[in-house]
Structure formats: structure tokens, C-alpha cells
Image (cartoon, rainbow, N blue to C red):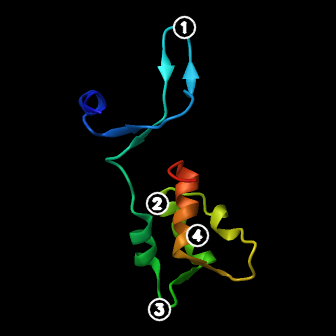
Amino acid sequence: AIYEYLLFSGQYRLQTGAPEHRTATSVVLRAQDLGKQSDYGVIFDNWVRDNNGKIDRQDVATNANSIGLDPDLFLVSSEEDDSISKEDFVGICKRQLGDGP
């Protein structure tokens, strides 16, 4: 544990699993940058206009470019509801950026 901290100054957390790439002279591992994490829950809360805890999918798609996300991901829904919950919003953001399941 101390070796990881000294090597990466606590900035990155190495992910367990198979390497991303391996050659005769190098191994590329996936790591999570702990210093540049966006709080998508806070972003969602800033966009909420009413008290129902959801945002209209079209409004989210309009604002998605401002945080560097693909607006089309927010327009697709298997539900008839035209709004998106905080949990769904955070999940989509994390999946698109590789920070979540």
C-alpha cells in the first residue's frame, strides 16, 4: 500500500484485473484519477428546476455538452417517462466516462 502511495502520490488508484495492454517491455494498467472526479449528483441538483427530483430528458440533453457528454445517451429511454432521475443521470455519466458500472 505504501508503495502505491509513493509511486503515484495518492493521485491514482490502480484497478485490479487484466492489463489493458502488454508488450515485451511494458504493461499498461487501468487507473482511476482521484484528483479530477466530477460530482454528477451536484451537477444534477443544479439543473433541477422543480421539486419532483427529476429533469426533463430534453433539458439534460441540451446541457450535456457543457460537461462534455454525449446528449444522445440521455434521450434514449425504455420508460415512457420523459424525465430522468438523479440515479439514472449519475449512472449514465459514469458509464460514458468509464468511472462506473
Residue occupied by mark 2: 67
Image quadrant of residue 31? Answer: top left
Q: Earlier in the sequence, mark 1 or mark 3?
A: 1
- Of tags 1 and 2, the one toward the viewer is 1
The alpha-carbon separation of the residues under discs 1 and 3 comes to 57 Å
Q: Say if mark 1 contacts mark 2, CB within 8 Å.
A: no
- Of tags 1 and 3, the one toward the viewer is 1
In the picture, the disc for residue 24 is 1
Residue occupied by mark 3: 51
Q: Residue at x 51, y 74 (%)?
A: 86
Q: Position of residue 76 (x, y in %)?
A: 71, 68
Question: Mark 4: which amino acid?
Answer: Asp
The alpha-carbon separation of the residues under discs 2 and 3 comes to 23 Å
In the image, is residue 74 above or below residue 48? above
In the picture, the disc for residue 66 is none
Say which quadrant the N terminus sits in. top left
Determine whether the residue tagged by mark 2 lies in a helix, strand or loop.
helix
Image quadrant of residue 92? Answer: bottom right
Q: Locate residue 35 relative to residue 60 in the image: left or right.
A: left
- How packed is label 1: few (under 14 Cα within 10 Å), some, or many (20 or more)? few
